[in-house]
Amino acid sequence: MSADCLFCKIVAGEIPATVVHETEKTFAFRDIKPQAAKHVLVVPREHHEDAISLAAADPQLLADLTTAGAEVAKVEGIDESGYRLVFNIGEDSGRTVFHVHLHVLGGEQLGLFGRP
């Protein structure tokens, strides 16, 4: 846990969140600024800065995040209609929290990715 990390504080229960799904290693909660009808963040309970550093440190935990993302899609009822899984990495991605998190987005027709 990183003492100044927002997501570490959410996982620890120090900051409230709407929990959608959790396992021994992952924690999923609703995004407070949703970018789709359904927008849930899936984080590892341990602190890792981004998906690249997590893949190097613990590839199984990265796989666990993806598995949890698929389970969130089922819980949210978007597993059959389609959904998007997104990791933001680096400054140009718009990332604002430096604790790896997987965005699960769906529940509506999503626009094209990137520039038209």
Image (cartoon, rainbow, N blue to C red):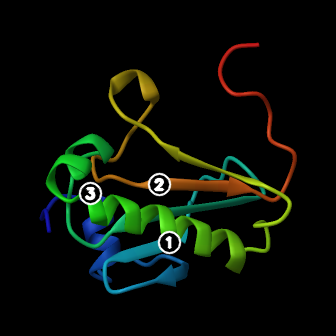
Which residue is rendered at x = 32% and y = 83% of the image?
13
Q: Residue 66, position in %: x, y?
A: 48, 61
The residue tagged 1 is 68
Residue 58's tag is none
Which amino acid lies under the numbered mark 2 shown in the image of this protein?
A: Leu
Looking at the image, residue 2 sits to the left or right of residue 13; the answer is left
**Which of marks 1 and 3 precedes in the sequence?**
3
Which residue is rendered at x = 36% and y = 34% of the image?
89
Q: Quadrant of the N terminus?
A: bottom left
Q: Quadrant of residue 87?
A: top left
Using the image, determine if residue 35 lies above or below residue 65. above
Q: Residue 11, position in %: x, y?
A: 32, 76
The residue tagged 2 is 102
The residue tagged 3 is 59
Which residue is rendered at x = 43% and y = 38% of the image?
88
Label 3 and label 1: CA atoms lie apart by 14 Å
Q: Which of these two is toward me, 1 or 83?
A: 83
Looking at the image, residue 20 sits to the left or right of residue 96; the answer is right
Which amino acid lies under the numbered mark 3 shown in the image of this protein?
A: Pro
Label 2 and label 1: CA atoms lie apart by 9 Å
Looking at the image, residue 105 sits to the left or right of residue 20; the answer is right
Q: Please say if the residues under marks 3 and 1 sit with CB atoms less than 8 Å apart.
A: no
- Dot in front, 3 or 1: 3
Mark 3 nearby-residue class (10 Å; few <14, some 14–19, many ≥20)? few
